[in-house]
Amino acid sequence: MTTTAPGDEKSPPVASVTAVVGLLVLFEVVSGFLQAGIAPVLPGIGDEWGVSDSALTWVIAVQLLSAAVSLPAFGRLGDLYGHRRMLRIALVSVAVGSILVAFAPSFGVLLAGRFLQGPLAALLPLEISLVRDRLPVELARSAIARLVGALTLGGLLGGLGMGIADKAFGDVRLALGVPAVLTLVCVAVSFVAIPESARRAAGRVDWPGVALLGLAVVAVLAGVSGAADGGWLSGTTLVPVLAGLALLAAWVVVELRTAEPLVDLRAMAGRHVAPYYFASFAFGVVYFGSQSPNSTFYATDPDEAGYGFGLSSLSIALAMLPAMLVSVVASASTAVVARKIGYRNALIGSFLLVAAGFAAFAAAHDVLWVVVAELTVLAAGMGVALGAMPTVIAEASDPSRTGVSTAVYNNVKTVGGAVAGGMFGTLLAAPAGSDDPAESGYAAVWLVGAGFALLAAVLALAARGRAAD
């Protein structure tokens, strides 16, 4: 059930809303910048705050855990009280967190800042809900593709930009000040010309559902993040994972008995949308899970390990540049491709491209230009999938729950990435007496990636109904 927001009974002209998409694109560029830009400066953070490499993993983990909690809450609050309002709150939280990270007097304060950056993950679902609410279907699809393309572009700029900033300033704190400035600009822009949602959902926030889902995801993520070090059967992995699954079961029971649940599980169980959520998990495995193995393979010294290319950080970034550019173009072109063959077919084709790229990796990875070409094929599929998945999820869901539906998609994808981290870390464990993983471990990672991409394609093929076709 939806209601009209007070003062928003009449929607503004489409042209004025379309112009505002440019501002949302800015937010996604900055979002991508922050998400990808932290990796190059992690060694500098360790030196500046005097923490070990193992402790540095919490710089990433804390932000992911915060995102897992905030995603469904911000999505549902946006559906109820306005997506622009929650977008502004998310941006303010990210800006405050970015300032804390740059000026943190201690490592604990830095982690608190990273926690406040968690709502960064809620920006895209809120923006998708806003454009779907205010624009006709075709314009909304095009806008979503532009937003996802902007996120990908921001990741490219962040990876290169933060590395360059760190080297240019010679001070990691000054480099961390760059995202702080960018987020403050976004906060100011969010109060300029962005319209509020014209439609609102009726009801209330299912806070027990938010708490149970957040705790369940946090427990699962905490468990699988330790699998690479302790193994899948260790207590540090099994206890939190089993606790998370128990909490997830309790959440399902609560949601099915709640009159106004956070997530309408009965609606999600339909064949028109359920396969896409399962595909989101598989997509998370290949999207997040492949990033670290590909980078470390590039960096491995072939004289010592018998494989790899021994590239520096800057050389790795340059080797990945063609693929990242192709990914940006592909995600921005999703709407054009989908108009010709349909969103579901575009999604199936993108997953097949990803599978082909991974399989090629496993078969041939001895020549640098060949690997760059294989990565480019894979990136083209990733780009289209990034652009198509939010659209099919949004259009397969009830209009009054677009925000929370796309938030759950991001959560499922994040969990898939966390599982991949533990799984791929196990596959890449160095054999006794060696500092480097066996080459067969990388081949196994790429073959598993190909398998999950094929699974995602099959799931998308199985979906039927009102999703974007």
Image (tube, rainbow, N blue to C red):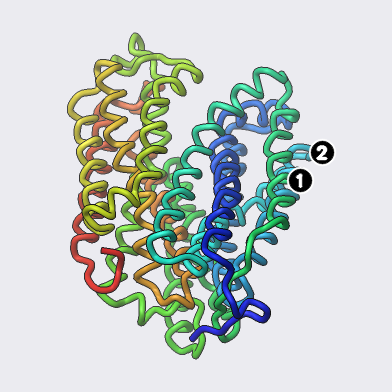
Coordinates of residue 160 in the picture (x, y in percent):
54, 26
| Above or below, comparing residue 67 to residue 365 in the picture | below
Categorize mark 1 by other alpha carbons within 10 Å: few (<14), some (14-19), many (20+): some
Q: Quadrant of the C terminus?
A: bottom left
**For the residues bearing labels 2 and 1, Cβ distance under 8 angstroms:** yes
What secondary structure is marked by label 2? loop
Identify the residue under disc 1. 109
Coordinates of residue 293 in the picture (x, y in percent):
38, 32
> Please, what is the three-letter code of the amino acid marked with disc 2?
Pro
| Above or below, comparing residue 24 to residue 404 in the picture | above
Instruction: Give the residue drawn at x 21%, y 54%.
Output: 341
Coordinates of residue 204 in the picture (x, y in percent):
60, 84
Direction from residue 450 to residue 320 in the image, left or right: right
The quadrant where residue 382 appears:
top left
Categorize mark 2 by other alpha carbons within 10 Å: few (<14), some (14-19), many (20+): few
Q: Nearer the viewer, residue 123 or 263?
A: 123
Identify the residue under disc 2. 105
Q: Across the whole image, how many numbered discs are drawn on residues?
A: 2
> Please, what is the three-letter code of the amino acid marked with disc 1?
Val
